[in-house]
Image: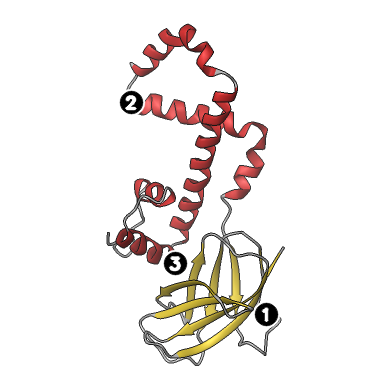
Amino acid sequence: MQLETGRHASDEVLEQYSMARLDTRAAQALEEHLLICSGCQDNLTFADAYRKSMRNAALELRRQGSAQAMPHGKRWFRELVGLPKPVWILGMAALALFVATGSRWPLIHSSVAQPALVLLESKRGAESPLNSSTPAAKPFTLMLDLTALPPFPQYRLEIVNAADRAIFGTTAAPANNELRAMVAKGLPAGMYYVRVYAPGPELLREYGFPVGN
């Protein structure tokens, strides 16, 4: 799958990615697109929340013994299925979201907020107060300053923990002397370091940043 410049990933592609159903090549192409497209990042976060709410709604309906009410509702169900497909799909989706969220809508709403932005402008051993942190286990986007680094069409990024163990890796293209990378699953609390490599094995720079509780 190749996403053209200026185009967004479809809802179907984002849903398949959220459910881990995309093949490796398509998933890698989408992840590269997500690094530079905040709109698709928002849509993916919403797709994740929507999928979880649908699953929770199904569990809630089972707990409420919906199977026992089925004979009484057969006629209603036949009438529902007789409606145009988009109508009953939207109706069922709305019902599932209502059952799953109830009065907890503020929690769902907050979960689709823009991922935190972590600004990095220093090397290990000379941490700058300008460097920001991010909450643990929450998605965030790294924004790295590339000042004084040799220009490349693409860089390789690696995140390691304080024990020098690799936690995350990706490639990204620069824009306006900055490099962005989204870490969709977040990280446990602790100190981490971002390494920027040339397209080959050469290490160009290392930044430190904390992840809070």
- Horizontal and vertical percent position of residue 157: 47, 78
User: Residue 171: percent from the left, percent from the top?
Assistant: 41, 74
In the rendered image, the vertical position of residue 61 relative to residue 195, given as above or below: above
* Residue 197: percent from left, percent from top: 45, 85
The C terminus - image quarter: bottom right
Q: Quadrant of the N terminus?
A: bottom left
Q: Amino acid at mark 1?
A: Leu
Q: Residues within 10 Å of mark 2 (few under 14, many from 20)?
A: few
| Foreground pick, 177 / 21 | 21
Judging depth in this view, the residue of 84 and 208 nearest the camera is 208
Question: Residue at label 3?
Answer: 35
Q: Amino acid at mark 3?
A: Leu
Q: Earlier in the sequence, mark 1 or mark 2?
A: 2
Q: Earlier in the sequence, mark 3 or mark 1?
A: 3
Residue in the picture at 56% in, 85% down: 206
Query: Hey, which quadrant is residue 87 in on the image?
Result: top left
What mark, if any, has residue 85 been given in the picture?
Answer: 2
In the foreground, 78 or 86: 78
Residues at circles 3 and 1 in contact by the CB criterion of under 8 Å: no
Disc 1, SS: loop
Q: Earlier in the sequence, mark 2 or mark 3?
A: 3
Q: Nearer the viewer, residue 211 or 9?
A: 211
Does residue 146 appear left or right of residue 21 in this picture? right
Q: Secondary structure at mark 2?
A: helix
> Which residue carries the number 1 mark?
130
Q: Quadrant of residue 53?
A: top right
Q: Amino acid at mark 2?
A: Lys
Q: CA distance from mark 1 to mark 2?
A: 53 Å
Above or below 28: residue 132: below
Packing grade of label 3 (10 A; few <14, some 14-19, many >=20) is many
